[in-house]
Amino acid sequence: MRFYRFAAVATAALLTGTASAETLTTGADDGQVIIDTNGFGTLGALNAQSSGSTGLYNPTGDQAAASTIYASGLFVGINGGARVSTASGQLQSFTGTDLSRTSVFTLGDLLSVQLVQTVSNLVDTAGNQTGSLLTQTYSFTNLGDADLSLDLFRYLDGDLRFDSELIDGGGRLTSGGNEILFETDTATGASDSATFVGIFNTGGTAAGFEIGEYSDLRTRAQGAGGLSNTIRNDADGDGFIDANRGYDVELALRNSLQLSGRGTGSFATSTIFGTGAPGQVVLPPPTGAVPEPATWAMMIGGFGLIGGAMRRRGQQAVVTA
């Protein structure tokens, strides 16, 4: 079993061009999460210093903790070109604590990026712990005089390791014009009480969403194409993967961000680790400079609750519905 650290302050990663894995954690109690990340914000299999899955989440109730993320990251395209992972950048600094880490890196010769990664507890209106939130805020600086158009593709392959299968469910909610995508450990076809992982973006302009099957979205993340604005196996169009039609789920959200010459702009992408019915999980108000603060105050929820044993991706077959 992997040993996880709970040190209050971590040593900075000083190697340019690499990013050692460090821990972000709200703790190990019910509703809390332990995450391995790096200075580029890539998680799991997208983090070269990680052995694979991460996001060890302990749901509320009697269910045991399990990992939730196989791979997660942000891909960036400039002026219509092919997108590249932020992990292709050159790291300049990476410092912080187990609750908040700040890094600076360059992406090519056109962008300087400051990344602030924070984790926080989620509580309902009665003050009960319902989950945890990872927020990754990217502040981009245009190093040139010409305007830049950024294509931002948030990708998550969330293997929920609470049963012995890779067959998951999920769905989509919209709130304040934002897409909020969820993955659950079973496909119930409804918004039942749940343990789930979800993503949403804040800042820039929304440019599409998709819930699909591994590894189609990951392949497209590294290209220049768009998203279909569809949910695979949602035949009735209600925004949820149909009951008993689950698969190896991937989530993707796409945003655009415009930078003037020598200008700056901010974009945040968040990962929710939650337990509960719709309306039980409440997002906190924003703490940074990312716009559209009203969208952070919306209530959101999830889907079906399952328990079980951990598994490895290489031991499971991908099922096509």
Image (tube, rainbow, N blue to C red):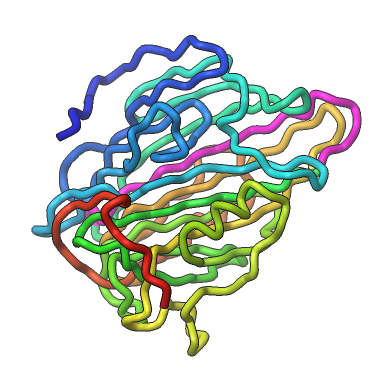
Query: Considering the image in quadrants, where does the C terminus appear?
Result: bottom left
Quadrant of the rendered structure where residue 76 is?
Answer: top right
Whether residue 159 is visible, yes or no, is yes
Reply yes or no: does residue 142 show up in magenta. yes
Q: Residue at x 47, y 38 (%)?
A: 46
Residue drawn at x 32%, y 43% is: 53
In percent of the image, x 72 and y 26: which residue is there?
108
What secondary structure predominates along the stretch shown in magenta? strand
Q: Is residue 118 left or right of residue 23?
A: right
Q: Is residue 188 above or below residue 51?
A: below
Q: Is residue 279 visible?
A: no
- Give coordinates of residue 309: x percent, y percent: 14, 55
Residue 82 located left or right of residue 86: right
**Above-or-below relation of 182 to 42:** below
Residue range highlighted in magenta: 127-148
Q: Is residue 34 above or below residue 241?
A: above
Residue at the limit of the structure toward the bottom, as seen here: 236
- Foreground: 290 or 167? 167
Q: Residue 156: x and y, percent?
A: 47, 52
x then y, percent, for residue 28: 18, 40
Going 73% across and 44% down the picture, which residue do you hit? 82
| Residue farthest along the top direction in this orientation | 14
Question: x, y percentage for residue 276?
Answer: 26, 66
Residue 31 belongs to the span the image colors magenta: no
In which image quadrant can residue 317 be found? Answer: bottom left
| Quadrant of the drawing holding the N terminus | top left
